[in-house]
C-alpha cells in the first residue's frame, strides 16, 4: 500500500504520492505501463497515466468527514492489470469557526452576593479535530458592562466582580462574549448575554402609620370591619408578600386581622364590657 499525508482542503493540483509498478517482461515485448485511478475517487484525485503521480483534484477533502481515505490505483501494460491501495491521511487545518450553543443567554444574580459569584456558563464548540489546538477555545468579554463582570477564559463561566443592589438602576446588563480558537490563524465568534439582578429580602416591612385609631360599637356584629393597617416593603415579588397577625393586646380575642389585606375585623362581642 502507498501512504501519504496532505492538508484538508488543499488546492487542486497538490502532489500526493507517486505510485510505481514494474513489468518483468523483456524490453523487446514489454509495452509501456499506464496508470489510472478507480472512478469513484476521480472527483478528488488525478493520476498521471505515464508517471503515476497522484495529485489532488477539485475542492479537496474535509478531514471532519474523512480522517483517512483509501482508494485503488491500477497499472496496465495493455494486456495485464495490477492494482494497489493508496491511503491518504488528511491533516487538520483551522477551518471551523466556534459555534455558541443554547442561545440566547440569560443569567441571574441575586443582589448583595459577594464578588466572584458564578452567574452564567457560556459554551461554544469547534468541529475541527478533537483535542487539537484548533478546538481549544478561549473566552473573553469584549464588553464587561463597565467592569462588573468577568469570564473564565477556559470554562466560559461568567462571574460578578462587584456587589449589586437591585434597587439601584440599572439592574439589567448586557455583556459581549468572544470565543476564539487557538488555531493559526485563529477563528472567532461572538454572542451577547443578558444578566439580571434579582431581589433579595433586604428590606423590612414598614407601617405607613405607627398608630391606628378606630372605634366600634359594643353591639357590632362578628366580621364587621374596624380599621385597615397599611404596610410597604421595598422588596419585590415573593420578598414583598406580607402576612398580618395580631401579636399582643387582643384579649379576650375580640378582633381578628385578615392575614393578606391587613383589615381588622370584629370577631365577636367583648363580654368583658
Image (tube, rainbow, N blue to C red):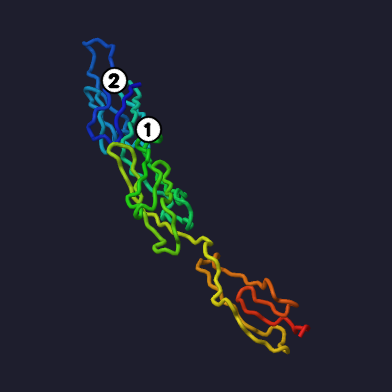
Residue bearing the label numbered 2: 79
Quadrant where the N terminus lies?
top left
Residue bearing the label numbered 1: 67
Residue visible at 57% across and 68% down in the picture = 241
Report helix, strand or loop for mark 2: loop
Name the foreground residue: 24 vs 102. 102
The quadrant in which residue 42 appears is top left
Residue visible at 72% across and 84% down in the picture = 222
Quadrant where the C terminus lies?
bottom right
The correct choice, above or below, for 132 with respect to 148 in the image is above
Residue visible at 41% across and 55% down in the picture = 104
The correct choice, above or below, for 32 with respect to 186 in the image is above
The quadrant in which residue 71 appears is top left
Name the foreground residue: 24 vs 242. 242
State the CA–CA distance, disc 1 to disc 2: 36 Å
The quadrant in which residue 10 appears is top left
Residues packed near mark 2 inside 10 Å, few (<14), some (14 to 19) or many (20 plus): few
Amino acid at each position: 500500500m502507498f501512504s501519504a499525508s496532505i492538508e484538508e482542503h488543499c488546492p487542486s493540483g497538490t502532489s500526493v504520492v507517486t505510485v510505481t509498478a514494474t513489468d518483468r517482461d523483456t524490453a523487446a515485448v514489454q509495452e509501456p505501463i499506464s496508470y489510472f485511478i478507480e472512478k469513484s475517487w476521480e472527483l478528488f484525485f488525478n493520476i498521471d497515466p505515464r508517471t503515476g503521480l497522484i495529485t489532488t483534484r477539485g475542492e479537496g477533502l474535509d478531514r471532519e468527514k474523512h480522517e483517512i481515505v483509501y482508494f485503488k490505483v491500477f497499472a496496465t501494460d495493455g494486456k495485464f492489470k495490477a492494482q494497489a491501495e493508496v491511503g491518504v491521511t488528511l491533516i487538520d487545518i483551522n477551518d471551523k469557526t466556534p459555534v455558541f450553543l443554547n442561545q440566547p443567554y440569560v443569567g441571574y444574580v441575586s443582589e448583595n452576593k459577594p464578588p466572584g459569584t458564578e452567574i452564567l456558563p457560556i459554551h461554544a464548540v469547534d468541529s475541527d479535530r478533537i483535542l487539537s489546538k484548533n478546538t481549544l477555545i478561549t473566552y473573553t468579554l469584549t464588553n464587561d458592562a463597565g467592569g462588573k463582570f468577568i469570564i473564565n477564559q477556559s470554562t466560559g463561566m461568567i462571574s460578578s466582580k462587584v456587589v449589586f443592589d437591585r434597587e439601584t438602576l440599572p439592574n439589567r446588563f448586557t455583556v459581549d462574549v468572544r470565543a476564539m480558537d487557538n488555531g493559526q490563524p485563529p477563528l472567532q465568534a461572538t454572542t451577547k448575554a443578558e444578566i439580571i439582578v434579582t431581589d433579595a429580602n433586604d428590606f423590612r416591612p414598614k407601617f405607613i402609620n405607627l398608630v391606628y385609631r378606630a372605634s366600634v360599637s359594643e353591639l357590632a356584629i362578628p366580621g364587621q370591619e374596624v380599621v385597615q393597617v397599611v404596610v410597604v416593603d421595598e422588596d419585590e415579588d415573593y420578598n414583598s408578600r406580607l402576612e398580618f397577625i395580631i401579636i399582643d393586646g387582643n384579649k379576650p380575642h375580640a378582633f381578628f386581622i385578615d392575614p393578606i389585606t391587613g383589615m381588622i375585623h370584629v370577631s365577636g362581642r367583648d363580654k368583658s364590657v
